[in-house]
Each structure stands twice: as structure tokens, then as C-alpha cells.
Image (cartoon, grey):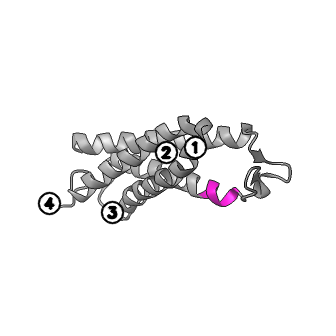
Amino acid sequence: MSGLAALVAVFMLVMGVAMVAIWTIDIARSPDVDRSRGLLRARDRSTGSLLVPHWLAEYGTAALLVGGAIGLLLHWAVGSWMWLVAAGLGALAYSSLNSLGWALADRTRLAYAVPMVVGLVGALISIGLLLAGAVLTFPGS
């Protein structure tokens, strides 16, 4: 594995684990989450939005990132697992950019924008490296 591939793998692992940690803490502690009817019916107090679909997307992104990172770090043989890397990075870029709108809309949420910018920039750079062939290599390449 190249040094760049290792860097991308560590970035993916850190971002995936951080997403799980942040969301788990937020779900458990945030006063903005109305959990009175249970987690499956939890809603955002300010908008009334159902939160489960968003949580599934965030935890799904984290799972893709961790799975792809593990494959890279353990030097798994070229195979069908490799889509985890591209899908995880793409989902991270989307999630980070989409969530920036929420973070920048209210000054009290500005601290959340920092990891979102890190996620977006890191995902875009990693995708660029992936497309350039610096992350995944195929036999004979």
C-alpha cells in the first residue's frame, strides 16, 4: 500500500468512527431531539422532521468508511469490497456538504462546521487520489 493509500485509509477510519461518536452522543443528549415517542419516531424539535432516515444515512456512511478503511489497511485482495471505498468517500462528501447548510444557518452550530469542512475537503482529495490511481491498484497496473 502506498503512503497515500494509508493516509486515505486512516482518514476514512477516523471520519467513520467520529461520525458514529458524534451522532450517538447527539442522539442521546441533544435537547433538540424529541425522543418522547421512542427513537424510531424521534423528531427534530425545531422543524418536526423525522430523524431516523437522516441517522440511517449518517451511520450508513460511517459503516462504508470504516469497511473501506479496513479493507485498505488489511491489504485485502482486489475484489468486490473495493466499492466501499468509493461509496464511503462519496457519501462523506455529500453528507458533509449537505450538513454544512444546517451548521452555517445558525451561529450556535458553527463548531459543527469545522469537522464538516474537514470531511468535505478530505473526501474530495481522497476521491481525486482514488481517480488518479493512487489509492487502489489493480493487478498489472
Mark 3: give few (<14), some (14-19) or many (20+) Cα within 10 Å. few
Query: Looking at the image, which residue is at 24% across and 43% down?
Result: 4
Mark 1: give few (<14), some (14-19) or many (20+) Cα within 10 Å. some
| Label number found at residue 20 | 1
Q: Which of marks 4 and 3 is nearer the N terminus?
A: 3
Does the magenta segment cover residue 52?
yes
Depth check, mark 1 against mark 4: the one in front is 1
Residue in front for this viewpoint, 18 or 117? 117
Query: Looking at the image, which residue is at 77% across and 49% down?
Result: 45
> What kind of residue is marked 2?
Gly
Residue in front for this viewpoint, 94 or 22? 94
| Label number found at residue 79 | 3
> What kind of residue is marked 3?
Gly
Q: How far apart are marks 4 and 2 (CA)?
A: 29 Å
Query: Looking at the image, which residue is at 62% across and 57% down?
Result: 54
Q: Mark 2 points at which residue?
A: 16
